[in-house]
Amino acid sequence: MLSKDERKAHNIAFWTAYGRYMQGHQSTFGTKVNWANYKTGIKDVFVRFIVENRHIYFSIELQHDDNEIRALIFEQFEELKKLLEAEMGGELVWQNQHYKMNGEEIARIYDVLEDAKYINRDNWKGIFEFMSSRIKAFDSFWFDWKDTFVHLCN
C-alpha cells in the first residue's frame, strides 16, 4: 500500500510518462493536443481517463445539467454507435444514466482495460497502448462528427 505522498509521486510519474509516450502525436485536426486532457470543444462533453488500481477507463462523459439536452446528446452518439465502435475497434459500454461519486447524474460511454495494475511500472507500456489507441480513435471520430454535436449543443 502506498502512502499519500508516494501515490501522488506515482501519479505524477505516470501522467508525465504518458505525456512523453504521446509526444509528437498530432491530432487529426492537425494541431498539437494535450492527450491526457483532451478538449472536445463542447461544453459539458468530456473525454476522460480514469485510472484506478486495477482498471483503466476511457470515458466519454456527457455532463449537461439539463437532462433532456444530455439525453439528446447521448441519442446522437447512439445514432453514430456503429461508426464510433468501428473506429474504437470494438464494443463500448453505453450508460444513459450514471451517478458519479458526488451524486451528479451524467451519461457516459466507456471502455475499460481490466486488471491493468498501474501501480506496477512494468504494466505502463500496455496501459499507454490502450489509452493511446482509444484517444486517437476518438480523435479521428471527433474530426468527422464534432460539427454535428456543435450544432446540437448550440
Image (cartoon, rainbow, N blue to C red):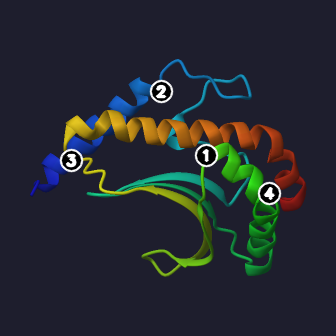
Give the residue at mark 3.
119
Secondary structure under badge 2? Answer: helix
In the picture, the quarter occupied by the C terminus is: bottom right
Q: Which residue is mark 4?
A: 80
Q: Residue type at mark 1?
A: Gly
Identity of the amino acid at label 2? Met
Q: What residue is rendered at 9% in x and 58% in y?
A: 1
Whether tag 1 and tag 3 are in contact, CB under 8 A, the answer is: no
| Alpha carbon separation for disc pair 4 and 3 | 35 Å
Q: Is residue 144 above or below residue 17?
A: below
**Position of residue 109 measured from the top left corner of the image (x, y, whole percent):** 61, 63
| Amino acid bearing label 4 | Leu
In-front residue for pair 43/36: 36
Which of the 4 image quarters holds residue 75? bottom right
| Numbered label attached to residue 22 | 2
Disc 1 vs disc 4: which is toward the camera?
1
Please name the residue shown 55% across and 60% down the image.
110
Q: Which residue is mark 1?
A: 89
Q: Are marks 1 and 4 in contact (CB under 8 Å)?
A: no
First reached walking from the N terminus: tag 1 or tag 2: 2
Residue neighbourhood size for the residue with mark 2, other residues' Cα within 10 Å, grouped as few (<14), some (14–19), many (≥20)? some
Label 3 – label 2 distance at C-alpha: 20 Å
Q: Position of residue 78 (x, y in %)?
A: 76, 65
